[in-house]
């Protein structure tokens, strides 16, 4: 591969990294993108929790699909990985993976380098072990047998999730620091070690750990695009393998990332990069001879790049300057209800008349005769705090229909401690912590109220799910406009817990899992 | 040891020390925070103050590593052996690669393409497309290491 081709590859890597993360303003705002393109799996390794990501990570999607095989067969994910594998194989690793680009850039840091050897070759099989254990067994075991979605690789290993997701979101969401614990510590250490390894050893993550590369590697010999061998020209000199930095034994095997560097070192002209019958990078010896072909190849490159630039420009404009998200971000909308406002969220969320609580002195006399039940709340529970969702604010009253047919009206629970939990069936930590809320409710029944609000996005029958679980607290599902989430400043991250004291004031509102000890403490604090 | 090798050696040391510094700082923050949390369940393990306190020791190492990198790049210092062909590797003959014949490959590709397209279309209707969208639009905190 000459310098020109190497430059082209770098340009394509940069392009794909930018295209996958076109939601640039997400980095500035610390918010993830929720537009419809998030349903499309990108071919390379790119965490969908990265603030810039406009597509889904195929590996994360695969784990989720495997973990919910008993509910819904993930045909879409299987199909798209099959399609990418068949078309590109590990060409994706060499040309279209942002994590590959980061690793190559880290390897540019000038230090003594560890070259490939028989030990790195042995290590290269580790990714298959990781694929089986963390991508297949753990999600299936936890998801199907225990009913808790656990994407094993994402949760325990993935440095891309830590680097792009956690590190991308934390600076703009400092309150999320409160949820960091052992998982973050472990994953941060893994990320640093992988980063360090990449400095000394070429594409360490790719070669030794990446299960996505392991999957695509299985398609390498049949992929449409890749480095192809002209067996008639090859004299088996081995220059290609010896000069390759990956742990290949022969060109195009499961370790080959089709970076095409071997083409430049093959003096026999036996290697070329092809897409079917179209030559993308000509063999070395034919470089100068086939000027006519080079001319047409140049035209092809120009056409491809023109289309690519238009696509990128469209994505940049669409994701950053329009509002493609399924819902407006909760933070923006809640700003409008923070002042004492009377607009009513639609459908399920029906806040009771604000006048009752915001102007108690004026309305008390007239309402006492009409609705004695509501005004019967004890005098001491009245709060003069402004309406809002932050600690110290009084939460806006709302009423919602629950899954079991009952109704939850926040105003009815004045004088009680109220716990509001935002969750989803597909969120592992949410499902793990909900039994703690049920236990807490039974400990303090009559003195507290709990409502668990499921995110509006779901393909599952939540009612059936709850019947299986047997949790006997009130559950509701948010409406299409996420009005309940907006009232409590529901984040794009789950789970989230909101605790109100007896006056209806927020004493806790944080994203992240809670423990039984924390819940007890929160109840005590809210009871005071 | 010549000057270039010394520079590479220093750079290696700085990279390793920076990484070690980050790991040690992270572990200290975690263990100190865990102690506090065991005493008070509502205490945070990671706080801005704790991170800032520990990061102070890592930042100089990181800055030094960046400076040495710039110097090395400017002087063109790099491991000369890095781009040399590997010697002790197992090589299989390219001509003996067990690649199926082109007609077999084409048949396999066609079958896979058909299966992939069918799967994608079925996935659009059975809800698995929506599942991907949902998981990509709501962050599971533990999945990205926030836990």
Image: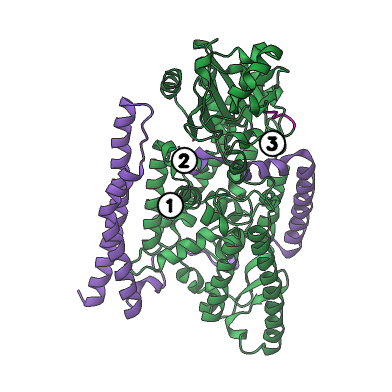
Chain colours: A green, B purple
On the image, the x and y values in percent for residue A109 come to 37, 68
Q: Which residues are magenta?
A: A347-351
Question: Measured along the vertical axis of the image, is residue A382 above or below residue A72?
Answer: above
Q: Main secondary structure of the magenta part?
A: loop
At 32% from the left edge and 35% from the top edge, which residue is drawn? Answer: B33
Q: Which mark is residue A123?
A: 1
Is the N terminus of chain B in the top left, top right, bottom left or bottom right quadrant? bottom left
- Is residue B10 among the parts visible in the rendering? yes
Residue that numbered label 2 is attached to: B146
Within 10 Å of the Cα at label 1, are there few (<14), some (14-19), or many (20+) other Cα atoms? some
Sequence-first disc among 1 and 3: 1
Left or right placement of residue A176 versus residue A470 in this view: left
Task: Output the chain of dot 3.
Answer: A
Same chain assignment for discs 1 and 3: yes
Instruction: Determine whether, in the image, residue A133 is placed left or right of residue B6.
Output: right
Decide if residue A400 is on the left or right side of residue A491.
right
Residue at the image point whose x is 51% and y is 39% from the top: B141
Front disc: 1 or 2: 2
Q: Quadrant of residue B71?
A: bottom left
x, y (%) of residue A405?
A: 73, 18
Against A511, residue A26 (above or below) is below
Residue farthest along the left direction in this orientation: B1
The numbered disc on residue A343 is 3
Is disc 2 placed on a helix, strand or loop?
A: loop
Q: Quadrant of the C terminus of chain B?
A: top left
Q: Residues within 10 Å of mark 2 (few under 14, many from 20)?
A: many
Task: Determine the CA span between mark 1 and mark 3.
Answer: 61 Å
Q: Chain of mark 1?
A: A
Q: Is residue A164 magenta?
A: no
């Amino acid at each position: 591969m000459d310098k020109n081709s190497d430059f082209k590859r770098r340009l394509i890597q940069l392009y794909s990294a930018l295209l996958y993360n076109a939601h640039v303003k997400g980095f500035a705002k610390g918010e993830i993108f929720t537009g419809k393109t998030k349903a499309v799996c990108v071919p390379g390794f790119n965490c969908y929790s990265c603030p810039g990501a406009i597509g889904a990570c195929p590996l994360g999607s695969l784990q989720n699909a495997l973990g919910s095989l008993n509910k819904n067969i993930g045909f879409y994910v299987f199909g798209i990985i099959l399609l990418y594998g068949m078309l590109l194989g590990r060409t994706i690793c060499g040309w279209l993976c942002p994590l590959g680009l980061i690793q190559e850039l880290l390897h540019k840091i000038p230090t003594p380098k560890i070259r490939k050897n028989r030990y790195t070759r042995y290590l290269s099989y580790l990714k298959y072990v990781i694929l089986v254990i963390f991508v297949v067994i753990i999600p299936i075991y936890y998801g199907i047998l225990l009913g808790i979605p656990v994407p094993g690789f994402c949760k325990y290993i993935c440095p891309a999730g830590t680097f792009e997701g956690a590190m991308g979101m934390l600076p703009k969401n400092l309150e999320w620091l409160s949820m960091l614990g052992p998982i973050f510590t472990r994953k941060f250490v893994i990320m640093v070690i992988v980063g360090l390894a990449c400095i000394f050893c070429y594409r360490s993550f790719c070669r030794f750990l990446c299960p996505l590369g392991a999957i695509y590697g299985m398609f390498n010999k049949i992929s449409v695009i890749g480095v192809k061998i002209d067996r008639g020209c090859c004299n088996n000199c081995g220059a290609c393998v010896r000069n390759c930095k990956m742990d290949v034994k022969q060109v195009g095997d499961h370790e080959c990332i089709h970076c095409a560097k071997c083409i430049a070192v093959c003096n026999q002209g036996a290697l070329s990069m092809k897409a079917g019958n179209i030559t993308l990078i000509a063999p070395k010896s034919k470089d100068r001879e086939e000027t006519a072909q080079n001319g047409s190849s140049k035209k092809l490159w120009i056409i491809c790049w023109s289309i690519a630039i238009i696509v990128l420009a469209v994505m940049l404009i669409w994701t950053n300057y329009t509002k493609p998200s399924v819902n407006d971000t909760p933070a923006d909308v809640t700003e409008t209800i923070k002042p004492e406002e009377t607009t009513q969220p639609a459908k399920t969320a029906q806040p009771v008349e604000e006048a009752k609580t915001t102007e108690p002195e004026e309305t008390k006399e007239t309402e006492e005769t009409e609705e004695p039940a509501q005004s019967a709340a004890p005098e001491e529970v009245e709060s003069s705090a402004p309406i809002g969702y932050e600690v110290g604010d009084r939460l806006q009253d709302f009423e919602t229909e629950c899954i079991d047919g009952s109704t939850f009206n926040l105003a009815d629970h004045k004088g009680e401690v109220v716990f509001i939990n935002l969750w989803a069936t597909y969120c592992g930590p949410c499902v793990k912590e909900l039994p703690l809320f049920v236990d807490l409710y039974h400990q303090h029944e009559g003195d507290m109220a709990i409502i668990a609000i499921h995110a509006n996005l779901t393909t599952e029958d939540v009612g059936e799910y709850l019947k299986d679980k047997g949790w006997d607290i009130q559950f509701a599902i948010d409406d299409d406009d996420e009005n309940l989430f907006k009232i409590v400043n529901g984040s794009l991250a789950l789970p989230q817990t909101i605790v109100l004291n007896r006056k209806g004031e927020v004493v806790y509102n944080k994203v992240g899992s809670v423990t039984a000890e924390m819940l007890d403490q929160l109840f005590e604090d809210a009871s005071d | 040891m010549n000057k270039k090798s010394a520079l590479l050696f220093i750079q290696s040391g700085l990279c390793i020390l920076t990484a070690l510094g980050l790991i040690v700082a992270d572990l200290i923050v975690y263990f100190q925070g865990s102690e506090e949390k065991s005493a008070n369940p509502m205490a945070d393990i990671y706080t801005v103050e704790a991170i800032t306190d520990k990061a102070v020791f890592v930042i100089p190492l990181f800055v030094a590593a960046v400076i040495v990198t710039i110097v090395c790049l400017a002087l063109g210092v790099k491991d000369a052996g890095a781009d040399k062909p590997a010697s002790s590797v197992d090589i299989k003959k390219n001509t003996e690669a067990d690649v199926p014949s082109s007609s077999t490959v084409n048949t396999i590709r066609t079958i896979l393409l058909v299966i992939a397209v069918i799967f994608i279309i079925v996935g659009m209707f059975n809800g698995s497309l929506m599942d991907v969208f949902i998981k990509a639009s709501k962050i599971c905190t533990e999945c990205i290491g926030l836990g």
